[in-house]
Image: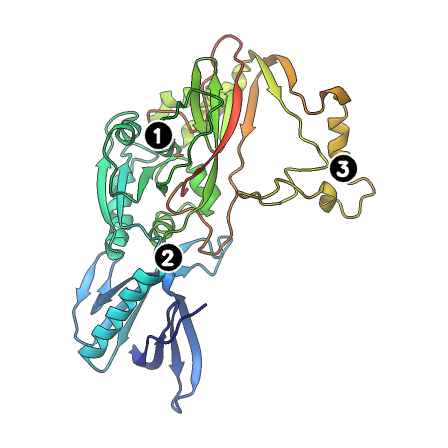
Amino acid sequence: METGLQLESTVWVGSKIYRAVLTGWQFNWTELDKKNRDKKTISVPVAEVVGVEEGRVEILPQKLIDDTDKVFTVFYVKRSSTGSSYGLLWTLGRTQFSVPSRVLRDQWTKHLRAALKTHSPVRPNRLLVFINPYGGKKKGRKIYHSLVAPLFELAGISCHVIVTERANQARDHLLKKDLTGFDGVVCVGGDGMFSEILHGLIGRTQQEAGLCENDLTVTLQPCQRHIGIIPAGSTDCVCYATVGVIDPVTSALHIIIGDSQPLDVCSVHQASGLVRYSVSLLGYGFYGDVLAESEKHRWMGPLRYDYSGTMVYLSNRSYAGIVQYLPADPLLSSPRDRTRCLSGCSVCSRSTERLFPHSSDAGSLYSSHYNQFSSDSEGEWVTVEGRFRCVVSHLHVQLVSQESSGPLSLGSPGGRHWGPHPGVGHSPSGIPQVSLQAHKHRGSV
């Protein structure tokens, strides 16, 4: 609901005359014809205004300022309107407004900045930034300083930047150092870097709550600090799954305006306690072997995964193990029903009949598989023992809507040059018995 009118005046954009109107939640400028009649209107939510500057200002690719008395520049989120990434790819929009006097210019900049503070309360003010200089194509520093830092500066966000030099440096920093005053943590890297930060923040939260992560029966506390990811790794799978595109500017803009996306986090335990957390894929066997092999070929860049995958596939290894799982009722849920599960909902409450509206037996595809187990096993754990080439547990990360209120911003795991992907462990020897426990943590992810 909009509040009352805050400011209205005539402005010029280039040689065209407009009527600009600022309300509580919206900033509009409408082109006028020679008879002062309305033509095209451009509307930007105040929540998506990135910054306001006096004079003619450019930010990207480099900052340029022409401080003229009667001009102000508004920067805002602009969505892509072409291609398969419609609405998902964000760029920095920029419009320069000319007004009759410096007094009016100052009024506009003052009112717009006040509206930002009033109607964008979830925006971060101070961020802790970790840069992995070795991830992906080793362009993390360049991506941050050339594309991301100027946007954070424009938005008035203060950043403390740490360029990591060793494995688990980011995790150790988050576990031990004072984090007072930081609204969130940003990782510039890939899935491995995110995994470090994820483990650091979850571990820190449990420490402060006096909880033991190794205790499988403990309900972990959700993290209050958000995580933001600037993609600069080899795969950036979590960034793609949550934002929809792998683009540093898009991710930075989501962080700036305070978007957030809750993430389910799976904790993996063995007899000795916690093994790791996962937000996407937990692989035993093939996937762990691929990542372990790929670490030997980091000089190849992202191609190392194709090479390592081929070599591991040809080796045809298998591992002895025991897998235990609890079968789901196929009439209550389906991985293909496209029902979005969020906190507080009845998970997969709709029947799979919606999948097959023209079929007489909606659940047949699932019940036929389920019925191979005896009725005595319903509600009980099923055990399978043998040799496995691969066991995969996929914690689905839901791609959010194209609206700004959804995608991951402050809060989203990244291939790091010194560690495996999040939630993916190298195959151990012997017969592992792994328990899975799901916890929810807020991440932006």
- Secondary-structure class at tag 1: helix
Asked if residue 140 is positioned above or below residue 91 in the image, the reply reads: above
Question: For the point 46% across and 42% down, which residue is it?
Answer: 262
Q: Residues within 10 Å of mark 1 (few under 14, many from 20)?
A: many
- Residue 50 visible in this rendered orientation of the protein: no
Residue 363's disc number: 3
Q: Nearer the viewer, residue 221 or 255?
A: 221
Q: Disc 1 residue type?
A: Glu
Residue 310's disc number: none
Question: Residue 298: x, y in percent?
Answer: 35, 26
Q: Disc 2 residue type?
A: Thr
Question: For the point 44% across and 78% down, which residue is it?
Answer: 40
Question: For the point 24% across and 55% down, which residue is it?
Answer: 156
Cα distance between the residues tagged 3 and 2? 44 Å
Cα distance between the residues tagged 3 and 1? 41 Å
Question: For the point 57% across and 17% down, which residue is it?
Answer: 389
Residue 91's disc number: 2
- Secondary-structure class at tag 2: strand
Cα distance between the residues tagged 2 and 1? 29 Å
User: Closer to the N terminus: mark 3 or mark 1?
Assistant: 1
Q: Disc 3 residue type?
A: Gly
For label 1, the residue is: 196
Q: In the image, is 310 to the left or to the right of 199?
A: right
Question: Residue 415: x, y in percent?
Answer: 39, 31
